[in-house]
Amino acid sequence: MEVLLFGIAKDIVGSSVLDLSGLKSKPASVEELIHLIKSDFPEFKKLTSLAIAVNGEYATNGLSLQAHDEIAIIPPVSGG
C-alpha cells in the first residue's frame, strides 16, 4: 500500500510516496490511515485540514481501504 503525497505533506514526510507495505497491520480505513500518519509524523497535527483521496475521489473517514487503492494525501492549499 502506497500513499501519494503532495505539497506540505511531501515536505513533512520527505518523499512523494509513503510506502506502507512493510507494516504488519495496514490501515483498514481512511480514519486509521490519518491516525497512523499523524502518529508517525506529528507535523501533520499542525495542519488546519487534511483531505484523503482514494482512487481519484475525496474520501470520508469511514471509507474502507484496499491494498490496491490509489491513495493521496491532499494538504491545505493556500491562495494568493
Image (cartoon, grey):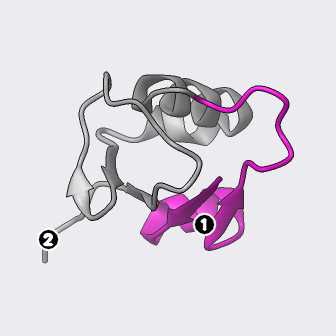
Q: Quadrant of the C terminus?
A: bottom left
At x 24% / y 32%, what residue is drawn?
A: 60
Rendered image quadrant of residue 12 = bottom right
> Residue 11 vs residue 15: left or right?
left
Query: As shown in the figure, which amino acid type bears the numbered disc 1?
Result: Asp
Tell me if residue 50 is in the magenta stretch: no
- The residue indicated by pointer 1 is 11
Question: Is 71 displayed left or right of 33 in the figure?
Answer: left
Q: Which residue is mark 2?
A: 79
Give the image location of residue 73, x and y in percent.
42, 55
22 shown above or below 30: below
Three-letter code, disc 2:
Gly
Front in this rendered view, residue 60 or 12? 60
**Residue 26, image x, y percentages:** 68, 32
> Residue furthest toward the bottom?
80
Answer with mark 1 or mark 2, whichever residue precedes in sequence. Answer: 1
Return the x and y of residue 3 as percentages of the image width and height. 56, 58
Magenta segment: 1-27
| Magenta run includes residue 8 | yes
Q: At 45% across and 27% down in the image, what residue appears?
A: 29
- Hey, which residue is sitting farthest left in the picture? 80
- Give whichever of 16, 43 is nearer the camera: 16
User: Which SS class for mark 2?
Assistant: loop
Looking at the image, residue 16 lies above or below residue 64: below
Q: Secondary structure at mark 1?
A: helix
Residue beneath the point at 14% across and 71% down: 79
How far apart are the alpha carbons under marks 1 and 2? Answer: 18 Å
For the residues bearing labels 1 and 2, Cβ distance under 8 angstroms: no
- Count of number-bearing discs: 2
How many residues crowd mark 1 within 10 Å: few (<14), some (14–19), many (20+)?
A: few
Above/below status of 42 relative to 16: above
